[in-house]
Image: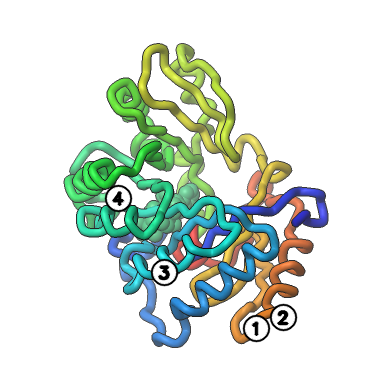
Amino acid sequence: MQDCCGRTIDYLRLSVTDLCSYRCRYCMEPEGVEKRAHGDILSLEELAEMAEAAVRCGVKKIRLTGGEPLVRRGIVDLCRTLRSIPGLEELCLTTNGQRLPQLAGPLRQAGVDRLNISLDTLRPDRFAAMTRLGRLEEVLAGIRAAEAAGFSGLKLDTVLIGGFNDDEVGDFLALTMVYPWEVRFIELMPMGPCAAWDKSCFLSVDSILQRYPTLQEIDPQGVARRYRLPGARGTVGLISPLSHDFCAQCRRIRITSDGHLKGCLHSGEELPLRGLHGAALEAAIRRGIAQKPPRHHLAERPSDAGRTMNRIGG
Ligand code: SAM
Ligand code: SF4
């Protein structure tokens, strides 16, 4: 279905939890999130009901996210249920990769089509410092497990952070010479803990094009501009919510793990969906799509999201 600006909305990011096994410094506070009562978070049945209603409203692709989606109990069953929704063309999941050694196979069997794995650094000491609780080796094992389970076209999502990993861009690009992966650099967005960080942390991904002029442009995909190094097996994606406002091409809506529809990641506007069923639920989703904000205002001020990324579903 189309929103008020004529954009076709066919992509839902569905958050299944706001809890996480890591505490990435730009995303979460060190103490993590206050554990909520079980009933405050959508049940698996509610998640499936909302996904089905969204598909009836024109959604063709769902990405499960969080928090960390793989810490949600019953995630594999949920994937199986969602994959059987008639009209859903693609089921994807974004993960920090930590639990993939156990779950990659079951997720593939449950019908998950694609995985994005977040990886901000290839240096063990930096990884431990940034995630506070993680070890690089467990994510690398997760990537290997995803490949072994038959996930092709893996995407590695790297948030580019000035003074933290901007000296590793070459190492990430080198991965694409060896592996058929897409390494995607994402601009750090000023929200949650990192909203207070120094301006020097917020780099334009265009700086990568300036430093690596041999990157050849190929077809874009969604909001990612895409490139390839000569002779590379993999590709490079640049996602620039700050330096290139891609709102005009945005096809997404989001549902938070406590059941609020957000038309825009950076808007405080939320539409409560809990307790709605059938035609009423569908009508609310259609209303949320119709009212999707035209654009964000990150160029002028920090995000108006009113929640940290883990509580929205990044
Ligand atoms: N836990 C999963 C993961 O890390 O992949 C899924 C949820 S996480 C919120 C989704 C993505 O959002 C991750 O790639 C993370 O790096 C990114 N992210 C979190 N905060 C961000 C921010 N302020 N700016 C840009 N990306 C951010
Ligand atoms: Fe967890 Fe993902 Fe946020 Fe890191 S970015 S703390 S892995 S939700």
Decide which of tag 4 and tag 1 comes sooner along the chain. Answer: 4
Q: Which residue is mark 3?
A: 78
The quarter of the rendered structure image containing the N terminus is bottom right
Decide which of tag 3 and tag 4 comes sooner along the chain. Answer: 3
Label 4: which secondary element: helix
Tell whether label 2 touches label 3 (CB within 8 Å): no
- Residue 94 is tagged as none
Tell whether label 1 touches label 2 (CB within 8 Å): yes
- Residue 276 is tagged as 1
Residue 6 is left or right of residue 219, and the answer is: right
Please tell me in which quarter of the rendered image ligand 2 is found. Answer: bottom left
Mark 4 and mark 2: span between their CA atoms?
43 Å
Q: Nearer the viewer, mark 3 or mark 4?
A: 3
- Residue 130 is tagged as 4
Q: Position of residue 185 (x, y in %)?
A: 45, 36
Question: Which residue type does callout 3 highlight?
Answer: Leu
Question: Which residue type does callout 1 highlight?
Answer: Leu
From this view, report whether residue 312 is shown above or below residue 201.
Answer: below
Mark 3 and mark 4: span between their CA atoms?
30 Å
- Please give the name of the residue rendered at 33% of the width and 63% of the height, measured from the top-left corner: 70
Q: Which residue is mark 2?
A: 280
Mark 3 and mark 2: span between their CA atoms?
23 Å
- Please give the name of the residue rendered at 37% of the width and 39% of the height, measured from the top-left corner: 154
- Please give the name of the residue rendered at 46% of the width and 60% of the height, measured from the top-left corner: 64
